[in-house]
Image (cartoon, helix red, strand yellow):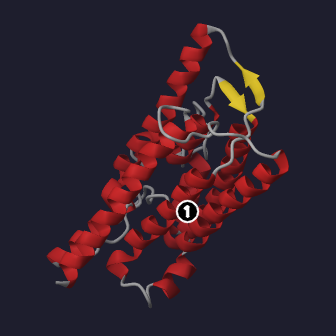
Amino acid sequence: MGGILAVLYGAAAYVFFLVTFVYAIAFVGNLIVPKTIDSGTPGPLVEALVINVVLLGIFAVQHSVMARQGFKRVWTRIVPEPVERSTFVLFATAALALLLWQWRPMPEVVWSVENPIAVTAIQGAFWLGWGILLLSTFLLNHFELFGLRQVFARLMGWKTPVPQFRAPLFYKRVRHPLYLGFIIAFWAAPTMSMGHLLFSIATTGYILIGIFFEERDLINLFGDQYRRYRQQVSMLIPVPWRRWKESEAEDHPALGIKAPR
């Protein structure tokens, strides 16, 4: 019964995430949803700025704190380990949903691209970013990243596998293609409003800070294996002469990369 409840809980958290994530794509892209990043009646600029910064801060603090290994060691004394990841997904999605719901528009235009070819290219980059992000989750383990693998393992009595350090496809060129996808999608806007610019700057800054703490955890977990990987592969921007060397990976079969969180 405990295993079944864990699966139902994990599935509900995943569906909540999936619906919110799809809405967030439309929100950032000013697509057809009830509320987007630029829609709504604008209020006082200072009020909108303060509220939006607080909303971004709530998401950043929640995500950063709950993702740290030290917090998880304490947290799993309260929350059963098989549902720890699903609980993280649930809280992170709730923080994102709050941001989407309470975001205040700041519609003043910072830049606007009018050339049809350029607009099409920027819109293409927007979808490319989301595509890179989504594919990056599957290159590692999408269902483990979002907690489903853990709850099904609890139900079926499977042992939790030892973390594998892998570098598939994108990860041979950049250490964090998932975050690169976010950055591309957030900045690819033919018309950039003040609100969208604030969102893009804040999320990019958070990503850079998050990478610092994430890589510290990865070094603690994998030691010199991850240090060698970090020396060979760029953080976010692909560089032609920097890539994961397959020959070295063959000499050291354990090398690779752990899923980001």
Give the residue drawn at x 49%, y 68%: 91
Q: Is residue 205 above or below residue 152?
A: above
Determine the secondary structure under disc 1.
helix
Position above or below: 245 against 58: above
Whether residue 93 is visible: yes
Task: Please tell me whether residue 77 is drawn above or below residue 12 in the rendered image.
Answer: below
Q: Quadrant of residue 53?
A: bottom right
For the point 34% across and 48% down, which residue is it?
138
Residue that appears at 68% across and 40% down: 41
Quarter of the view holding residue 28:
top right
- Is 191 or 246 nearer to us in this picture? 191
- Side of 128 where 213 appears, left or right: right
**Residue 113, position as x, y percentages in the image:** 69, 17
Label 1 Cα crowd, 10 Å radius (few <14 / some 14-19 / many 20+): many
**Which residue lies under the disc numbered 1?**
95
Q: Position of residue 184 (x, y in %)?
A: 58, 35
Labels in figure, total = 1
Q: Residue furthest right?
A: 46
Which part of the image, by quadrant, shows the N terminus? bottom left
Q: Could you say where residue 71 lies in the image, as x and y percent from the top left? A: 55, 80
Amino acid at pointer 1: Ala
Name the residue nearer the viewer: 65 or 196: 196
Res 237 quadrant in image: top right
